Amino acid sequence: MKNKEIAELLYDMGELLELKGENRFKIIAYGKAARAVESLQEDVEAVWQREELDRIPGVGRAIAEKIAEYLQTGRMRAYDDLVSETPAGQRELLQVAGIGPKTVALIHEKLGVSTLDELEAAARQHRIRRLPRMGPTREANILRAVERYRKRSSRIPLSIAAPLVEEIVSYLRRIDGLDNITPAGSFRRGRETVGDIDILATSSRPQEVIASFVRMPMVEEVLGKGPTKASVIVRETVQVDLRIVEPRSYGTVVQYFTGSKEHNVKLRGIALQRGYSLSEYSLKRTSTGEELYFDREEDVYAAIGIPYIPPELREDRGEVEAAMAGRLPHLVEQADILGDLHVHSSWSDGRGSIEDLALAAGDLGYHYLALCDHSPSVGIAGGLSEERLQEKMAAIDRFNEAGEGPTILKGTEVDIRADGTLDYPDSLLEKCDLVVAAIHMGFSQKERDINGRLIAAMENEHVDVIAHPTGRLIGRREAYQVDLQAVLEAAARTGTIMEINSHPSRLDLDDLWSRKAKELGVDIAINTDSHSPDQLRLMSFGVTVARRGWLEPQNVVNTLTLPSLLDRLGL
Ligand code: DGT
Ligand code: CA
Ligand code: CA
């Protein structure tokens, strides 16, 4: 349904016209039309098909034509013209909360301010407060709004979003009268960063749920609040939208707000071909106008006649076509994971003993766990000398002989030195059950050198896995210069396993490269790189990346049973 999209466009038109100093009636007409389209009870596209756009109260002839143009061509020339006439800086100023066309025009005329930076400088120098209708309070508010706008334009990493979602959802679940609840949007699809957090719920007492939501202790600002929805800011910059929806439409609403927008466009197209118009409220038979309601998302896909598409795939990357052809992958699940092949212990910089880690792994139902502590070069992380590694291997043998709990594999995370050699001699690596190799230093080398290091490591017959292949830390450190295509081809050639590192700050390989690995026939290990027993639970983030990369259990080595894994490792 394009109602919201068109309403936004009309609101923007009104603002841009006002900024331009256009005729007041024209400006008012756009605002009125925007509200009319926004509150329309049916799909604006259906009204257009009946050629009744100009019969919507508040929508005149001229605006009706523009809406029709947009529905037909996907563009509105009048809007495009206005946008190109308005300086980009001024358009950005309109996006700052509390700043409208009047203010933008005023500060431009009186202070020559036409960009965000100039506005911030003017506010800091107290030049805003002296303008008519301004004053110190307004000036301070503008400054805060600018700061918030700046922070808000950056996306929120999963490492921040995930615990917040968990906290908010468990808070809301405790409210009386709350029935269903689910996160939707990019969070549900498992994207590595989210723009904002969308939560959907059903309740017999929506008003009370909304009231409790905006009163949560973590809420710092309420952006908007209505009878069935509210938006708040938590942790300074994170926007959370809650919608309470009708139980009978829960399935279509969850489908709609899970997105992605591109997936939904594709799906609606397929629905139309099959005689249905799909909206967030219902699936309507176009021939009879009969509306079908679904309280379960699975039933929406079934009614359209295609298999259920898991949220992680809904990015319009071929999933709708695959579903129609009956070729959706059988995505790997957390329950398929039988062990973790990259875990640190208190022998190096981890916090758990062999026993602690084995216990935690047992709780997760794992069959095996590879303890991969650092090698000597990584001195700050307590890298083990050759002697210490031998001692640790003996300790693991003693633990396994006792025979309680998962099997501990004797591993190492050996550093790939700047010259591409490994930080332990082959004679020692040979004694390990599992050798994980990774780059920890020399990040600024040229791509050719980095690739040379990784490929040299992969060519060593003892190296089984390359850990966190790009070295990125989301939001903190860019990947080193690496040609992953060439690295993955080398992995295919040498039979080296590539890691999906599950730490929410790493997620490395990412979804797209994981999918590329699968296409090239490269095996994946989903590992946590845990530094304490509780971090073993981070596995779910890696599984999500794998699912977004279309991986199936057979692509992931740590879904193998212990004997098959040992076989794969040549043991
Ligand atoms: P984000 O928040 O930028 O990480 O991405 P999303 O996907 O969570 O997007 P958001 O929060 O703007 O909206 C949530 C979902 O709602 C989105 O994935 C699909 C649906 N949606 C929102 N606006 C539109 C729209 O204008 N058209 C369509 N088809 N779907 C929309
Ligand atoms: Ca979102
Ligand atoms: Ca949203």
Image (tube, rainbow, N blue to C red):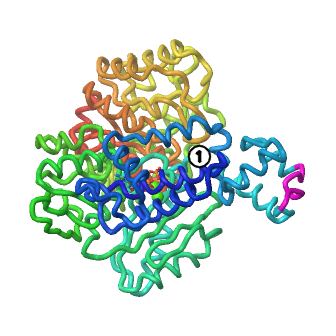
Q: Which residue is drawn at 60% across and 36% down?
A: 85
The reply to whether residue 362 is in sight is no
Report the front residue among 339 and 319.
Answer: 319
Q: In this view, does 273 lie to the left or right of 149?
A: left
Give the crowd class for mark 1: few <14, some 14-19, many >=20 residues within 10 Å: some
Residue 322 is a magenta residue: no
The reply to whether residue 75 is in sight is yes
Report the front residue among 175 and 506.
Answer: 175
The three-letter code of the residue at mark 1 reads: Ser
Task: Give the percent coordinates (x, y) of residue 364.
Answer: 35, 59
Report the front residue among 178 and 496.
Answer: 178
The secondary element bearing badge 1 is classed as loop
Q: Is residue 505 left or right of residue 268?
A: right
| Main secondary-structure element of the magenta-colored stretch | loop
Q: Which residue is label 1 attached to?
A: 154
Q: Is residue 90 above or below residue 203?
A: above
Q: Is residue 396 above or below residue 232?
A: above
The answer to which quarter of the image holds residue 206 is bottom left
Q: Is residue 449 above or below residue 488?
A: above
Task: Give the percent coordinates (x, y) of residue 428.
Answer: 45, 25
Q: In this view, does 478 lie to the left or right of 287?
A: right
Q: Does the residue labelled 1 lie within 8 Å of ligand 1?
A: no
Task: Give the percent coordinates (x, y) of residue 513.
Answer: 37, 31
The answer to which quarter of the image holds residue 524 is top left
- Count of marks overlaid on the render: 1
Task: Give the percent coordinates (x, y) of residue 391.
Answer: 50, 39
- Residue stretch rendered in magenta on the structure: 125-132
Report the front residue among 124 and 400.
Answer: 124
Q: Which residue is drawn at 31% across and 43% down?
A: 72
Q: Which residue is drawn at 39% across and 35% down?
A: 499
In the rendered image, the quadrant that contains the C terminus is top left
